[in-house]
Image (cartoon, rainbow, N blue to C red):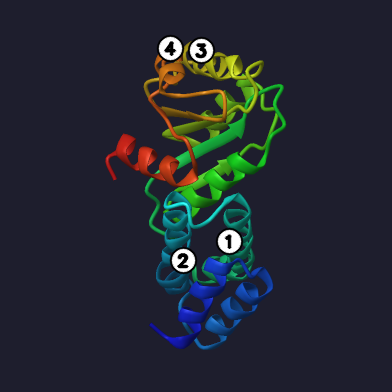
Amino acid sequence: MSEILKQLQEVVIVGEADQAQELAAQALEADIAPLTVIEDALNPGMEIVGNRYECGDYFIPDLVMAAEAMKAAMRVLEPALTARQEQRHVLGTVVIGTVEGDIHEIGKSLVGTMLSAAGFQVHDLGVDVAPVEFVRQVQETEANVVGLSALLTTTMLNQEAVIEALEEAGLREQVKVIIGGAPTGPEWAQTIGADAYAENANEAVERVKELLGV
């Protein structure tokens, strides 16, 4: 691995967004292919971050900073990918959002970033997302995974409402549904007919991979 990519991987791990953006630009100037930058520096860097979080060495603020660093680098790399007409190998398409009535952002955004780093195409709908919007996005993107976040006991019921809406639209067989959020758990996932539950962003990536067999 080139020295630039080593440095880029390290600044992603420690969450230095400005340096990540600068090093991504340097990599392109050094004629390193943008896909190589992603696959050899950004993805393994985020994997290390996820592992450290899982082991208890990293905490939510560390994940947030690493995610911002990766996004900063991707803002530089994506135009170069388009210019070269290159595409990342996509493992699956995920529609993710915080359900209607709930405005909690951080956990859902981390899951989206980690999934993107792992090779998934992620469509983040944001917060307070109505069931009909999840349905519309699945139809438009032909997603094969839906991620539903809820941080309140009063809004977790809307995870079930989204699953019912997918069933009514004839889309439930097309998608795997994974849920998460503080008041939820494996039992709740089983109760509402979700396919999986994940406690954190790193686990979400593993569960989605398992669901799709990738």
Q: Residue at x 51, y 12 (%)?
A: 164
Between disc 2 and disc 1, whose residue precedes? 2
Q: Are marks 3 and 4 in contact (CB under 8 Å)?
A: no
Check disc 1 and report the residue beneath it.
66
In the rendered image, the quadrant that contains the N terminus is bottom left
Q: Residue at x 66, y 22 (%)?
A: 130
In the rendered image, the quadrant that contains the C terminus is top left
Q: What separation in Å lies between label 3 and label 4 (alpha carbons)? A: 12 Å
- Given the image, on which type of amino acid does mark 3 rest? Glu
Query: Could you say whether the residue bearing mark 4 is in a helix, strand or loop?
Result: helix
Between disc 2 and disc 3, whose residue precedes? 2
Q: Nearer the viewer, mark 3 or mark 4?
A: 4
Disc 1 packing (10 Å; few <14; some 14–19; many ≥20): many
Q: Residue at x 50, y 17 (%)?
A: 163
- Given the image, on which type of amino acid does mark 1 rest? Ala
Q: Is residue 53 above or below residue 15?
A: above
Q: Are marks 2 and 1 in contact (CB under 8 Å)?
A: yes
Residue 159: image location, x then y, percent = 55, 20
Check disc 3 and report the residue beneath it.
164
Query: Could you say whether the residue bearing mark 3 is in a helix, strand or loop?
Result: helix
Q: In the image shown, does 95 or 68 lie closer to the viewer? A: 68
Check disc 2 and report the residue beneath it.
45
- Given the image, on which type of amino acid does mark 2 rest? Gly
Q: In the image shown, does 42 or 47 lie closer to the viewer? A: 47
Between disc 1 and disc 4, whose residue precedes? 1
Check disc 4 and report the residue beneath it.
191
Q: Residue at x 64, y 70 (%)?
A: 16
Between disc 4 and disc 2, whose residue precedes? 2
